[in-house]
Image: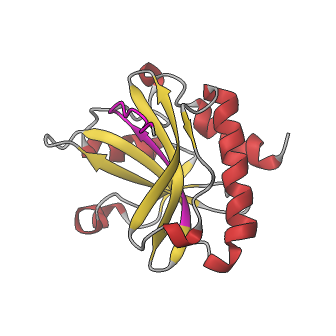
Amino acid sequence: MSSFIKIIAPILLSVLTLNAGVYEDLEYGDTKQEVTDKLMACNRVENTVPKTMFGRVGLNGTFRIKKALNGVNFSIFFDWNEHDKLKEISLRSDAIDQEKYSSTLRELFKKANRLITEIYGPAIMANPMPKNTQIGDGTILNSHLWHIGEGTLLMGIAKEHGNLHLSISFLEKRIEPIRN
């Protein structure tokens, strides 16, 4: 078993059922304060800014997974519903240069896909890894979709400021794949 799988398995195994938490102890419907408190108490993540700054900078990207995955670090991002309750958690890798698309990013993508498939079974939508030229700046192009309980897991590639990221998102909403 590769070191990548040994490291990411505990992360992804924590989301096997929604009742056990989406990520660590986080659950859909948590408030921002509950998310903050739970992550501050978690020994597998760290905050990157002082807690007193959360109100100014927000929670997105302020927590990261302590252990690098295959040499790549991941930060945690959130989305909230109209009642400011948690509806999405995304694990996003640090920026990867476009020159490393065919090496670092492709290897990370393949290993993450293999592990997620081992845990949840085959994706109900599985396309090739998006080409660098297909991804617009400021967007995420998801190529894989799994149904997890009533929710969805998406995996794809994001591009921001010309750099690439592996994105793994857990959504409360069930998304159906587009069939051609």
Give the total of numbered labels: 0
Residue at the (74%, 58%) spot, across then down: 107
Q: How is the image coloured?
A: secondary structure
Inspect this view and state whether residue 62 appears.
Answer: no
Give the vertical position of 44 relative to 15 (above or below): below
Segment tinted magenta in the rendering: 165-179
Q: Is residue 174 magenta?
A: yes
Specify the quadrant of the image occupied by residue 99: bottom right
Specify the quadrant of the image occupied by residue 102: bottom right
Viewer-side residue, 124 vs 138: 124
Residue 60 x, y percent position in the rendering: 36, 59
- For the view shown, which residue lies furthest in the left direction? 83
Determine whether, in the image, residue 97 is placed left or right of residue 179.
Answer: right
Give the vertical position of 146 relative to 55 (above or below): above
Residue 78 x, y percent position in the rendering: 35, 50
Residue 49 x, y percent position in the rendering: 41, 67
Inspect this view and state whether residue 149 appears.
Answer: yes
Q: Is residue 82 magenta?
A: no
Viewer-side residue, 9 vs 146: 146
Determine whether, in the image, residue 153 is placed left or right of residue 174.
Answer: right
| Rendered-image quadrant of the N terminus | top right
- For the view shown, which residue lies furthest in the right direction? 1
Give the vertical position of 38 relative to 76 (above or below): above
Residue 163 x, y percent position in the rendering: 53, 76
| Rendered-image quadrant of the C terminus | top left
